[in-house]
């Protein structure tokens, strides 16, 4: 098992979160109508209650814990961290409606697979290859590589940083999922 997959599984299983994670999620939620994390939707109104921070933190933790696959849970955490950078760097005045974090992760995986096809990367052995009809039927019930939550296993084993890192793909997916985030070329990337 690869180092980054093992790392994501352990962090997800132990519900380890980055420093200031809850404050970052709070800042995201203040700028949108809600955050859909897995099956839970955290409404903007959670940020309006004066003594609601403890309830807010409990609700965030509960939303994450309900995601059954530990490595997928960690990708959701990474996606929320990327979203927090949009707020932190004042890229947009507001994030708008409900943000479906899962859509951001799925789009990042799709971009990863497109790049894997271009460079004939490791994912060409499973999710990025052109599938025949039998393989398409298998893929409908799950991925050929066995990746959790229909995310390619090779995406999970990618380091967060670098040209082919998960954070890079999550950042690239932002303007494709959220219409009010500037497109590449319209902004400078704060992540290198």
Image (tube, rainbow, N blue to C red):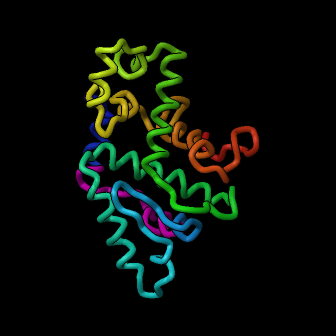
- The quadrant holding residue 125 is top left
Q: Where is residue 152 in the image (x, y as percent from the top left)?
A: 36, 30
Give the number of marks: 0
Residue 100 is covered by the magenta coloring = no
Residue 2 position by quadrant: top left
Q: Residue furthest right?
A: 186
- Residue drawn where x is 29% and y is 37% of the image: 148
Segment tinted magenta in the rendering: 12-27
Residue at 47% across / 46% down in the picture?
A: 103
At 39% from the left edge and 74% from the top edge, which residue is drawn?
A: 56
The one of 80 and 20 positioned closer to us in this rendering? 80
Relative to 123, say whether 140 is above or below. Answer: below
Q: Position of residue 106 (x, y in %)?
A: 44, 40
Q: Is residue 51 above or below residue 176?
A: below
In the picture as drawn, the residue positioned furthest to the bottom comes out as: 50
Image position, residue 46 (x, y; %): 45, 76
Question: Which residue appears at 42% of the width and 87% of the height?
Answer: 51
Judge whether residue 22 is colored magenta: yes
Residue 56 in the figure: left or right of residue 116: left
Compared with residue 51, is residue 168 higher up or lower down, i.e. above or below? above
Left or right, 19 with reference to 10: right
Q: Nearer the viewer, residue 79 or 164?
A: 79
The residue lying toward the viewer, choosing from 118 and 14, is 118
Quadrant for the N terminus, please. Answer: top left
Where the C terminus falls, by quadrant?
top right
């Amino acid at each position: 098992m690869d180092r980054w997959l093992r790392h994501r599984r352990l962090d997800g299983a132990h519900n380890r979160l980055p420093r200031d994670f809850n404050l970052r999620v709070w800042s995201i939620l203040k700028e949108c109508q809600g955050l859909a994390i897995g099956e839970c939707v955290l409404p903007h109104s959670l940020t309006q209650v004066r003594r609601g921070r403890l309830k807010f933190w409990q609700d965030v933790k509960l939303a994450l814990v309900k995601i059954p696959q530990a490595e997928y849970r960690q990708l959701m955490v990474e996606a929320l961290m990327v979203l927090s950078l949009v707020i932190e760097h004042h890229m947009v005045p507001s994030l708008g409606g409900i943000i479906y974090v899962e859509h951001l992760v799925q789009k990042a995986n799709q971009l990863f697979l497109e790049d894997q096809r271009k460079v004939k990367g490791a994912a060409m052995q499973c999710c990025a290859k052109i599938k025949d009809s039998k393989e398409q039927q298998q893929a409908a019930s799950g991925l050929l590589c066995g990746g959790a939550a229909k995310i390619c296993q090779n995406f999970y084993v990618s380091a967060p940083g670098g040209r082919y890192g998960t954070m890079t793909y999550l950042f690239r997916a932002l303007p494709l999922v959220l219409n009010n985030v500037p497109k590449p070329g319209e902004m400078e990337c704060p992540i290198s």
